[in-house]
Image (tube, rainbow, N blue to C red):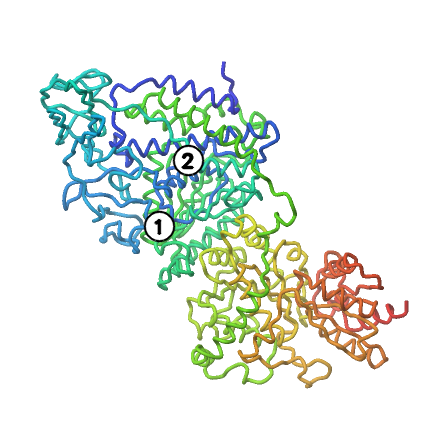
Amino acid sequence: MLSDVSTPQDLDDRFRAALTALGAPAQRRALGEPLPGGAPLTGAQALALFDAQLTSRLLDLAGRWLRSFGEGYYTIGSAGHEGNAAVAAALRPTDPALLHYRSGAFYCLRAAQAAGAFPAGPAVPDAAGPAALIPDPRSPGDDGADAALDAGTPDTEGVTGTRAADSGAASSDSGVALSDSGVARTGPGADPSAPGEGPSAPGPGEGPSDPGAGPSGAGADADVEIGSGEATSTSTEPPLVDGGGAPGGSLRAGAGAEVGAEVEAASLPAGAGVAVDAAGSATAGVPELPLPDPDDAYAAAARDVLRGMVASVEEPIAGGRHKVFGRADLAVVPTTSTIASHLPRAVGMGLALERLRRNGRRADGDAPWPPDAIVVCSFGDASVNHASATAAFNTAGWCDHTGLRIPVLFVCEDNGLGISVRSPRGWVAATLRARPGIRYFAADGTDVAEAYRVAGEAAAWVRRHRRPAVLHLSTVRLMGHAGADAETAYRSPAEIAADVARDPLLATARRLVEAGYATGEELLARYDERGWQIRRLAEEVLDEPKLASPVDVVAELAPRRPVRISRAVADAGTQAAGPAAGARAEAFGGRLPELAGPLTLAQSINAALADGMLDHPGMAVFGEDVAVKGGVYGVTKGLRDRFGAARVFDTLLDETSILGLALGAGVAGMLPVPEIQYLAYLHNAEDQIRGEAATMRFFSRGAFRNPMVVRVAGLAYQEGFGGHFHNDNSVAVLRDVPGLVIAVPARPDDAAPMLRTCLAAAAVDGAVSVFLEPIALYHTRDLYTDGDGEWLAEYAEPGAWAARHVPIGRARVYGVGSAEDLTIITFGNGVRMSLRAAATLADEGIGSRVVDLRWLAPLPVADIIREASATGRVLVVDETRRSGGVGEGVIAALVDGGYVGTARRVAGLDSFVPLGPAARQVLVSEEAITQGARTLLAR
């Protein structure tokens, strides 16, 4: 007796019993024929979808098996969600995909598409002639989104007309060719079920195909003449031939049927074979299903997934760092999120793809995907409630409302549960339908034909209109959330049984049998054969090596190639001084920054951004108030006028979306420079940096990257401002992110070269940098006395950029007095205060060296140790907080480096910054630095 719990063994037993019960169809149909009832699939395509689905199901079982003896490390499976294979089939393999963790069947089908193993689709009648072919979604197609659709379809809510592409036409005549073995095949010289042969598959959204029309006699009468070793056939319109006899009595179809020397008009399904023996007798019928090829595309996809499960270094995307769905040649971008934090990136990718398409730039270094590609992004129903998903939907709708095109197809796979928490009935549909600017589509994800049809319509709508849509797929939960999940703790046996009854794999098998393409026994044999294949692959990958050293693990975390970066900076200077000098002078309106006299920190950053825009054609500057207003502090003033609204633009007020746009733009080939208006605002969206930006190279072994330079106005000391929103001094969350570069320029003559370094690192290594700009120093002019102008600096001419290059992780040292008594290590606002304090100490005969860290990650450890050891006395001036502040890292670096002198910290209190003069009570002051130095020297 089978249990009421969908355990792996139970699910397998139920599926086997159900397949056996399906028996054999009353009539047998060839795989090349369309599904009955107007479904836009052939039998061969439905079988391929079944192969992807059963491969995914067997991978789930393999994951549980591997885990049972401690060799598998991931048991979240795709059981119940296998309908997403139809979504993959409705897309092109060049459409970038960011996949939910239950996307096993999608991944398997995408692998088959890319390998050319997904069969071609049925033909549809065309007014211009018989049976014109529908364009194939597997190939990029024409550059324009309208190439595969009716040019007369209005740009309104929905596609109102379709047409067949002019890529060719299938003849209604069907030939029968004898092979060397005497077997005659119907069709235009090929087995209609063979992968990659026959007419093109239906273009996404082209509407259901006409099941009564098709090449190779699909649904056509076959008049067969058998002569002396020759066979010919012409086709008209026929009933199906069953296994019991043949119309007209001259040809008995089915296994073992014989044909006499003279054959009258007979009916054969497309793909039926006619075998002629030496005596002139012939046998006609539909061949049995072949067993799967042990080395086909589904096996290759299964090997990828199994390698992820066992953390093999041979896994193609993460190399054993995580189990993810991803592969560059499949355009599957890895995501590690379970709760939709990848959705903002998808919106950014859509925006970037459309901008690159409109600008005419292609995959030759600017964009890795065709210009008419669309982005697909899948997620679970519970994730619609997450802030990052809400931000993504809102941004996509906001952009659409303002006229910006975002070609993104969101796919919500709704099994009604978020681990154990139920989605309220109707909530997900109501939520998705209510999103302004996002077209809503819905389909039963357990019905592969319906899912394929609706997914095709949705994908075509997005591709044609370049606007966002959501596909709401209803799915089921089988085998629980993961291996350790006890479903009976929160689901009744009746609920579990109801989901098992809607098993999408069984639904596809039932359709194949009822339509006449296979018997239950054949599908069971196929299931068993694939099962043994996956068992063999699982045993093979167990022997593959694992990551075995720290170096191996972090190799792709944040590659540092300082020589290439410095060369890139030098090349930019050479170009700006030479061939691009005219364009540069024009961009600056003839007022070159190096001729403008000493600049403030804000002015220097502004000039460096302009030079960066000239050097990097794919660079874009965006954020709140950065374009029209030129930034709250004027740092981006004039950039929009110089470089246009396509490259300098304002965004909506949402930091998650700003960073998501940058993430997507970086993956799509641009160099984004988003601005976060205040440091505190970054905390609203920090997971976009921690969980998304910094992980991309790590979890893709460098196959994908999202270069970006995030400009953030921050730190404290703004007179009159307070609170934790405009005077925030917390950077601990950034310093904790592996691989992230954190730059803090204090002086104008450091700001420009450091920004150039960050841009070069993004372009060369795909680095993610946070460029933290001290607000209080933006417009500071003086250092020691009013009017001395010593905090201003000249802007370097391009010819000097190489000589003044500032490498990542190198500090700047100022000597004050003898510079032999004390080392002050600081950054940001602390540099100016420390230099002033050092001048006071110099009057007392104390010589100091002030070390400006400049880089908070990676810390300039070698410079810290060297300068500390030179005096044996270190005062760390940290304007952040004592707990989790930068000073903790500096002290730790000293200890780890073997420093044996004395050290002391002066740091801000563990407090938020209050308003007005009260801020001075919790922040570091010049007086506190001076007193700290004296106390240290008195020891």
Residue bearing mark 1:
462
Above or below: residue 508 compared with residue 370: above
Closer to the camera in the image, 908 or 304: 304
> Looking at the picture, which amino acid does disc 2 mark?
Tyr
* Mark 2 vs 1: CB contact within 8 A: no
Residue 197 occupies which quadrant of the picture? top left
Image coords of residue 712 (percent x, y): 59, 64
- Nearer to us: label 2 or label 1: 2
Residue bearing mark 2:
298
Q: Earlier in the sequence, mark 2 or mark 1?
A: 2
Image coords of residue 751 (percent x, y): 61, 72
Q: Residue at x 52, y 29 (%)?
A: 62
- Determine the secondary structure under disc 2: helix
> Looking at the picture, which amino acid does disc 1 mark?
Val
Closer to the camera in the image, 921 or 278: 278
* Count of marks placed on residues: 2
Residue 939 occupies which quadrant of the picture? bottom right
Q: Specify the farthest residue to the top.
A: 1
Q: Residue at x 45, y 34 (%)?
A: 81
Q: Is residue 509 left or right of residue 903?
A: left
Mark 2: give few (<14), some (14-19) or many (20+) Cα within 10 Å. many
Above or below: residue 455 compared with residue 569: above
